Amino acid sequence: DLTKPIGALNPERLNILIERFKDLDGFNEDEKFLYGSHYSSPGAVLYYMIRQEPFTSMHIELQSGRFDVPDRLFFDMAGCWRCCLKLTSDVKELIPEFFTCPEMFLNTNIFPLGTTQEGFKVNDVVLPPWANGSAHEFVRKHALALESEYVSQNLNHWIDLVFGFKQRGPAAAAAHNVFHFLSYEGTVDLDSITNKVDREATESHIQNFGQTPSQLILKDPHPSRYPASDVWGPLINEAAKFRELRCWTPSKQFGVSDSCGAVLSIHVLTEHIVVIYSNMSVGTYRWSNKGIGNAPFLFKPDKLRPIGERAFFISPAAASGSSTIDDHAASSHYRARVVAKQLETTTDDSNCHMSIDSSSFGVSIGGYLKDNFCRKNVASGSRSLDGNASLDSSFYLLSCGYWDGTVRMHSLEGLRLKCSLNGGHSGPITCLSIGECHGLMVTGGQDATCRIWVVDHPNLAIALSGETPHSSSGYLGESDQDRLLICCHVLLGHVNPISCVAFSSDLDVVVSGSNDGLICVHTARRGKFVRLIDVNSSRSSEKEQRSSAVSKLAMHLQGFVAHMEDQMLYSLTINGTLLTSVSAEDTLHTIEVSSDGQMLITGGDKYEVVIRAIHTLIVRCVLDLSKHGPIRCIALTPPENNPAPQFMYIGTSDGLVTIVDTANENIGKG
């Protein structure tokens, strides 16, 4: 019941607390309280997070150099709930990690937490039966419950209690939401306490017994969230009726009349769809979600222009061969190791062909313009890009896979070459990925390194580098080329060519895969190595453990999915825990994650688009596109385009784009 504080959930306990409240005769009326403890305190955080550093060390320090008595530790969810429901001194709330951090329930560090009086050895937290013994499943379902319709319709009552008008005053008293007066902001002036002992006691109480957050909403109740049926939702989601998905292949496309080749990449803007073909031509289509005739959309060919051949091209920047960052001695040693490793593992024809696919292209509006647009949206109270079609002409097309080892930036309006740089890569750049912020990009190369680039945001580049960054020809100048693309970090860890990268600027995480089957995790803004993951080591037999190259990577909020060259699919957490694995039974060319992060969408040589539950990789739906050939790329309408309905765009080897929508008006529509 989110209308009540934790302490008021049990009527029997509440009656005891009310009686105690009435007996507080020695307190002033404004100093009386129902709950002597608090729902948010350092002790509660350390109680929950005892298995993870640095909280383990902080807990030991709080307990005078040892772990607390085993019976008082957090080791059983059911027992913890009983205490919160019955004890008058226990009213703690959940912490955010309950919805994001499975590791908090696992004693991965094998700390000696002791044995209870009943002989139970404290180790991992005992979870409810519906978690199936998995901390990751517990957190996943917990997060889904937080986003459920019931919580969405009632969370506003909890906000009123914690941040709103029921936090203080008569409304708080009526809701039985009264805590110790020292926990409230501004109730005591520490500077006015002249007695040193009294001041230290007051400060200690505030620091250790919990603090009530600032009251953000003083008068009116917080409104409830709109019902799910009235708001925008992703086209592909766990509750979708997949039988209602419909495929449309417009007859008027560049791929029909022109020999454009396969569709390599699709990028969805506000009123335009950008399609890149294998003959290196770029087709733009006018787009509207308000259809004419039977189709529920308008998809009209606009312009078809060449971006240039995949021939060797030398720009003044690339010809200099210098890096955009300082070369350290460690980098030289690292390159020597990479070269030696490649000489051991490569064959004569291994580098004669370099594939180009959807991971070779990306579009970005640039970090500076994106930031400005977000600020205007915050000021106006809007979150949508819808209705801002003028921004379409401001996008850049970024591409790699050229033999001169550069990444190139073209303006989408006119396809003018704005920038061509190598960023210090020694050899061709094989893949790239652009973050949600539009201001950061990651590239991976055959030199076994990844590079972090800032896209059209010089101030961000200075912030990330900690100094004025270098351009390809020295220190940052005033030329457009020097300002549009700036390389800030080199990510090391691989010893074989990079085969794919996935990047989330929201999570600040870069995941990269190489030809030897190893996966590296780095932070993006600091460029720090986090961990190395070898999914091949999880295979049972020695024959199965042969290195298989990482073919594709896709990130989501809970982790990432890796597709290997041997057709295996792996679902892993960022911390490297393998959740599940299955055979895709297909050579995949593209993998995408649904906007809600719950579904995986793949396509490959079997002419099928397969939709799987991302936590189990179980197939939920298959779309048959056999008449169009292998699936080369998949794109979804970006969530920030809401309330415009979401569509899925599928590019195939016959040069056509197939568009998927749903007959259900409440899915994928505003």
Image: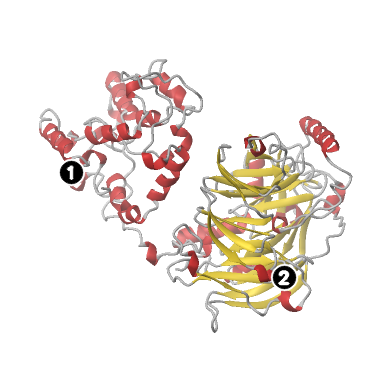
- What residue lies at 36% left-to-right and 19% top-to-bottom? 68
The answer to whether residue 114 is above or below residue 26 is: above
- Image coordinates for residue 614, horizontal then vertical, percent: 53, 51
Neighbourhood count class around disc 2 (C-alpha, 10 Å): few under 14, some 14–19, many 20 upward: many
Q: Report which quarter residue 298 is drawn in.
A: bottom right
Q: Which residue is mark 2?
A: 655
The answer to whether any part of residue 168 appears in the image is yes
Q: Which residue is label 1 attached to? A: 173
Q: Which residue is outermost to the right?
A: 348
Residue 50 or 473: which is nearer the viewer? 50
Quadrant into which the C terminus falls: bottom left
Left/right of residue 425 with respect to residue 96 in the rendered view: right
Q: Residues within 10 Å of mark 1 (few under 14, many from 20)?
A: some
> What secondary structure is marked by label 2?
loop
Residue in the picture at 51% in, 48% down: 615
**Residue 563 image position (x, y, % from top left):** 65, 48
Residue at the spot 20% in from the left edge and 48% down from the top edge: 171
> Residue lying furthest top in this view?
65
Q: CA distance from mark 1 to mark 2?
A: 67 Å
**Mark 1 or 2, closer to the camera:** 2
**Taking 173 as reference, is 374 above or below it?**
below
Identity of the amino acid at label 1? Ala
Residue 114, percent across and down? 40, 18
Q: Amino acid at mark 2?
A: Gly
